[in-house]
Every structure is written in C-alpha cells, then in structure tokens.
Amino acid sequence: MILTGPAIAAAVAAGEIAIDPFDPARLSPNAYDWRLGETLRICDGDLDAAAPTPFTETAIPTTGLLLQPGVLYLGVTLEQTGSERYAQMLNGDRSTGSLGIWVHVSAPLGHAGHAIRWTLEIRAAKPVRIYPGMTFGKLIFLQTFGAPASYQQLGCKYRSTDGIDISRLYEEMPGSGA
C-alpha cells in the first residue's frame, strides 16, 4: 500500500522518511512532487553495456535548456530522499509527460534503506525547454512487508549514489574484475 500525503508528512516529522529539502506544499494526495536538479549529463555517442558511458556534463541555466529528441540525458533530483522503513517509487507525471518528456521509465524503485538524490533517465519526443528546480514528477512511498532488509547493509552497487550516476552494468560483464 502507498502512503497518503498526510501520512508522508507524519513519517517525515517522525524521522521515518527523509526528504531534503522538504516542502509540505509539495505533498499531493498520494505522493510528493519532486523537482529537477541543476545538472545534466549528456550521453555521447554509441552506448555499450560492457563499458562506462561517455558523457559531457552541463549546468541547466536558469533560462532553461532545450532537450533534443534522440539524445539520452541523465539528470538528478533536487531532493535527496530515503527511508529505512519504506520503499520509494519515483516517476514522471502527467505535466512532464504532456510535454513529451519521458523521465525515469526504467528504474523507479528505491529500496528501503536507499538514501539518494535520484539519477534520472530523460528523453524528449520533441525539442522541449526544461528548467532547474521545475516540478518533474511524483514520488510515492510504499509500506514494506517481511523481514527488514536495508539497501545500505546489503552492499548493493548504487548504494553510495549522491548525484548523477552512469550505468554500472559494465561491472557485471565477464572479465570486468568486479
């Protein structure tokens, strides 16, 4: 089951959920409206699952940045979120989708114990201007069942993410030494 906006606020007040920065006005009936951070990584050239992704990094100007179709952008949430008690699901929303922006389609689950600024996969259907700090999606919190398991304690590869992170799938490839 997912938490309602008032339940999210109560869990933040009780220290069971961390959202930094937290703004109670960003709560909706069943979610928290998260914002786009100030930096993008633009993935360059062809991508290869067996090699680190080449990229260039750019700050999003306050006047906006025009996203182009056919380009993979990696962004980051303005908010850092986490909880040892609740799992998280991060998605785009209708407002960004109606602009032809696909955001975070492939990796919406934040495990219990995962305290991060989310890396975002962003694609544009048409040229579209985005701005730092704009509302970009919704974050929901899910009640977990069963024995507690913390992402931090399991030693997972993305546990130390504090900003934009490229795919680390290459670490799992034969001969990677990982």
Image (cartoon, rainbow, N blue to C red):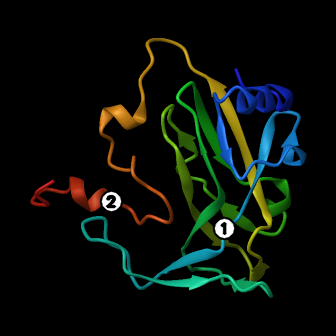
Where 81 falls versus 1 (above or below)? below
Give coordinates of residue 9: x percent, y percent.
80, 32
Q: Which residue is mark 1?
A: 37
Identity of the amino acid at label 2? Arg
Q: Residue at x 58, y 45 (%)?
A: 108
Determine which quarter of the picture holds residue 147: top left
Q: Which residue is mark 2?
A: 168
Q: Check the picture and name the quadrant holding the N terminus.
A: top right
* Lateral position of residue 67 relative to residue 23, left or right: left
Q: Pick out the residue farthest to the top.
A: 146
Q: Nearer the viewer, residue 114 or 65?
A: 114
Q: Residue at x 37, y 80 (%)?
A: 54
Query: Dot 1: what SS?
Result: loop
* Lateral position of residue 166 relative to residue 107, left or right: left
Give coordinates of residue 74: x percent, y percent.
54, 70
- What number is the disc on residue 77? none
Q: Nearer the viewer, mark 1 or mark 2?
A: 1
Give coordinates of residue 59: x percent, y percent.
61, 83
Going from N to C along the chain, the mark reached first, 1 or 2, is: 1
Q: Nearer the viewer, residue 172 or 151?
A: 151
